[in-house]
Amino acid sequence: MKKSLLIGATALALTLASPFSQAHRVWIKPSTTSVSGDSEWITFDVAVANGIFHPDHFAYPAERLSVVSPSGNPVDIQNQQKLRYRSVFDVELTESGTYKVFNASQSLVAFWKDEDGERHFWPGRGKTGTVEEFYQAVPQDADDLNVMETANRLETYVTLGAPTADNNKLTGKGLELKALTHPNDAYTGEPIDFQFFMSGDKAQGTKVIVVKDGEKYRDTAGGVEVTADKEGKISLQFDEPGMYWLEAEYEDDKAKAPAKKRRASYVLVFEVLPL
Amino acid sequence: MLKDTPCFLPLYGKKSRSNTLLSKLYRLALPLGMLSTAMTAQADELEITLPTLNVAEYHAPYVAAWLADERGKRVVDIAVWYDTDMANNEGEKWLKDLRMWWRRSGRSASMPIDGVSGATRRPGTSTIALDGRFDDVAAGDYFIWVEAARELGGRETLKVPVSLPVKQTVNASAEGQHELSSITLHMEPAQ
C-alpha cells in the first residue's frame, strides 16, 4: 500500500513537473476569453488530463496558479474547489484589459536507478530542486543518472473590453511565448503569430502542437504540429472557431552543471473566434 | 427617429460636422427645409428591419450599425441598440455577442456612446438619420455593416456598399435570413 502510494506520488510529480515526457496534458480552460461590461466573471477548469478538454485524470491544484490584472496587480482566485478530475475557480474581472492566469516553475530534476533496478525521481512531488540539495539527495554514482534543468509554464489569457499587452512581458525564465498576435484577438482565417523564447533567447526549433476542443468527438486527433523557425516564431491559422490547446517543448544541452540538458514546456489555452 | 418622422438634424454633429462654407450654409438651411420639405426629396437614412419571430421566448436583438472601410476597419459608429434598462449597466454584458462590431469598435468604446447607442427596438422598421454623419470621412469606398445578435437566438450580419462622398442618389439594400429582415441605405448627393 505504502509503495503504491509512493509510486502514485512519483507519477504525479512527473506529470506536474514534466508534461513533456507524459501523454497527459495540462490545461487551464476559461469558460470564455473575451467579455464585455463594467465587470464580469469568468469560470475556469484546470486539469491534467488525457483529453482536450475532457477532464479524466487528475485535478490540478488551483492554488498553484497566479492571476495578474491588466495593471499588474495580483487578483484572488474565488470559489475554488478541487473536484475529482478537475479543479474549478472563478476570476472577477473588474479592470478593463487583459488578465493572465498562470503557473511557472523551474527545477533541477534527476532520474536514476538504484542497485535493485528501481527507478527514482528527485526532488519529488511539487518540490523545487536546487543544486545544493541535489548533491545531498541524489547518489552521484547511480546508474542511468540523468540530470536536467526543467522549466514549465502554464498560461491562459482573458480580457474585459479591449485586449492589452502589458501582461505578456518576458521574464527570461524558462520557455515563454511572446504573443505577436494577442491570444484574445485570434480569429478564424487570420494568421496567428507567436514567438518563443528560452531563458530570454529566441527558441529556434521549439516543437509546438495545437489541438482543438472536442477531441473526443473526432476519429483523428487532428492536432497541428509546427516547429519554430530560427527567430523562434510560428504562424498558425484556423478555419474553425473554438478553444485551442497549445503545447510547446524545447530542449537543448546548454545547461549548467550538474545538469546536462535543459528542457522546458509551455502550455497556452486560447480561443479562436469567428467573425 | 421613427420611420415617419425623418430627422433632418444630425443626431450628433460636433465631430462629424464638416467645416466647409457650403456645408454650413446647408445646415443653416435645414430648418427651412423642414418647413418646406422641398429642399431634399428624402433625407440620408439607414433603415433596419427586424423580423417578427414566432418563438417561445423573444428578446429584442442587440443591433450595431457602422461604417467601415474596404479592409473592415470601423470608421464611424452609426447605432448600437442594447438593453440600457438593466441595473449597474448589466445590459453591457452581451455587447460582445455583436462579435464583429465588438472587435471593430465596441471593445475599445466606453458605453453609452453619445448619439449612437440606445435601447433595443421591437420588430419592424427603424430609421436612422445619417445626414452629415459622414461629412468628415475621407473620400473612398466603404461598407455600412449591420449586425444583430439575439438572446436565445442567432446572429446575422448584412452590409451594403457606399462610395463617399455621395455623387448620385444611393439606394442600396440587403436581405437577411434569420435575425435581420433587411437593411436599406438611402443617400443623396450634397446640395
Image (spheres, coloured by chain):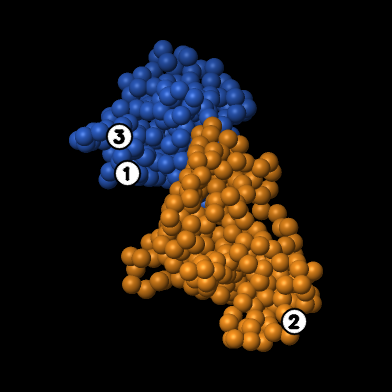
Chain colours: A orange, B blue
Give left or right: position of B32 versus A16: left
CA separation in Å, label 2 and label 1: 65 Å
Residue A62 tag number: none
Tell me if residue A31 can be seen.
Answer: yes
Residue beneath the point at 53% across and 34% down: A39
Above-or-below relation of A195 to B77: below
* Chain letter of the residue beneath label 3 in the structure image: B
Q: Which of the two marks, 1 or 3, is nearer to us in this view?
A: 1
Instruction: Tell me whether marks 2 and 3 sit on the same chain.
Output: no
Q: Which of the two marks, 2 or 1, is nearer to us in this view?
A: 2
Q: Nearer the viewer, residue B128 or A170?
A: A170
The residue carrying mark 3 is B50
Above-or-below relation of B104 to A192: above
Q: Secondary structure at mark 2?
A: loop
The residue carrying mark 1 is B154
The picture places residue B47, in percent across and down from the top left corner, at 35, 32
Give left or right: position of A55 versus A183: left
Residue beneath the point at 55% across and 66% down: A9
Residue A140 tag number: 2
Q: Secondary structure at mark 3?
A: strand
The picture places residue A162, in percent across and down from the top left corner, at 57, 42
Q: Secondary structure at mark 1?
A: loop
Q: Are marks 2 and 1 in contact (CB under 8 Å)?
A: no
